[in-house]
Amino acid sequence: MFPIKFNQHFFILSLAAIVSGAMLLPNRVSAFWPFSTNADAATTNTSMPSSATPILRATLNSNPNSSAPIALATSGGALVSRSGPDGTPADIISAPPPDRISVYPVRPGDTLSDIADMFGVSVNTIIWANNLKNAQDIHPNDTLVILPVSGIEYTVAKGDTLKSLAKKYGADADEVAKYNGLDPAAPLKIGSAIIIIGGELVVPAPSVRSSGSSSAIRQSYLGCGGPVRDGYYGNPVPGGLITQGLHGCNGIDLGAARGTPVYAAANGVVIISRSNGAWNGGYGNYVVITHGNGSQTLYSHMRSAIVGFGQMVSRGQLIGYVGATGKATGAHLHFEVRGAANPFRNCSVGSVCSPQ
């Protein structure tokens, strides 16, 4: 054994012994507490671990004081931070339901293709819904609307033209060309797939020949409906005339004069407020409110919106005024419910109807 010399608070090992590898530690060693004035009194004995000693493992419980297992967050097999730089859990965006509208703040290094992959939509969907010039037209701190597209995928057949398809499905030929990156003057390629897009694209509802009721089918219209929430939604345009039944993404149209007040259908938080007079995916000036039951309501073609992003609103609160912006042939409010049955689903066209 090589001597270990103790100073008052330090100890010095023989460097030569360490380098030569000749120093051997005994099975029992002494732990020295350097801040004690009595070294012997502070010396305790402990055993060195043997090969049978269990290996230390990271905890699998996010609450070490709890005996109940609480799984830690992981991503790609790696542990994930419980709070990210923006204060959100791990800064990981969970995929929203396919019919919900999302808002995404652009961060440094983001590309439009990355964002599109994140939300499971196409690059064209984001360009079209945000009036972007091209895929490079995004900048940090921009706020993008991720708008699930209301439309259908169509395989071009012989004789099809943009004009004929737009007429058949109630779409706009120029918008279909813009969305799909097509030359409006060039013929369509037979066998190619295109998206027939439109903010209020009318797709014929399926005929009812099964045991299910028509209302049951309408509740999930184009995948944007959901369960009935009796009495949850109020009338956004009291006295408005039903000018079109279910179409688009579980939406109806309420006709009224320009400037007629538009009210929130239920309590919630504004997640989108666009009042810039732009196309905005056909919606024009529009507002989207998210509600406590997990649904969203959308109010479009407004002359103007008077509520802003992040604002809490109450049922019956004024949020804007009826207009004809975006894809609209006359003054009306296009009212969608995403994630629940539209309360006007059973109303007759031409009637003044109360929500159910």
Image (cartoon, helix red, strand yellow):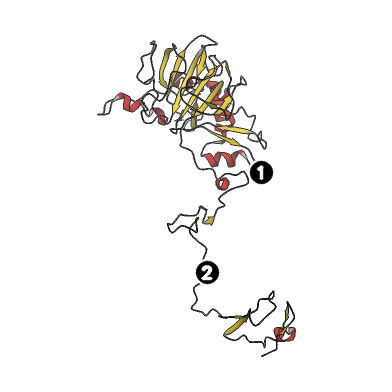
In the rendered view, tell whether residue 355 sits above or below residue 79.
Answer: above
Is there a contact, CB below 8 Å, between mark 2 and mark 1? Answer: no
Q: Which of marks 2 and 1 is in front?
A: 2
Instruction: Check the image and report above or below for 90 versus 286.
Output: below
| The disc label shown at residue 109, or none | 1
x and y, in percent, of residue 166 in the image:
48, 21
Query: What amino acid type should be assigned to the residue bearing mark 1?
Result: Gly
Of 8 and 322, the residue lying toward us: 8
Q: Is residue 115 above or below residue 223?
A: below
Query: Looking at the image, which residue sits at the far top?
Result: 257
> Looking at this view, is 197 or 150 the one in front?
150
Q: Hey, what amino acid is under mark 2?
A: Leu
* Residue behind mark 2: 56
Q: In which quarter of the image is residue 43?
A: bottom right
Quarter residue 229 falls in: top left
Report x, y in % for residue 235.
Answer: 44, 18
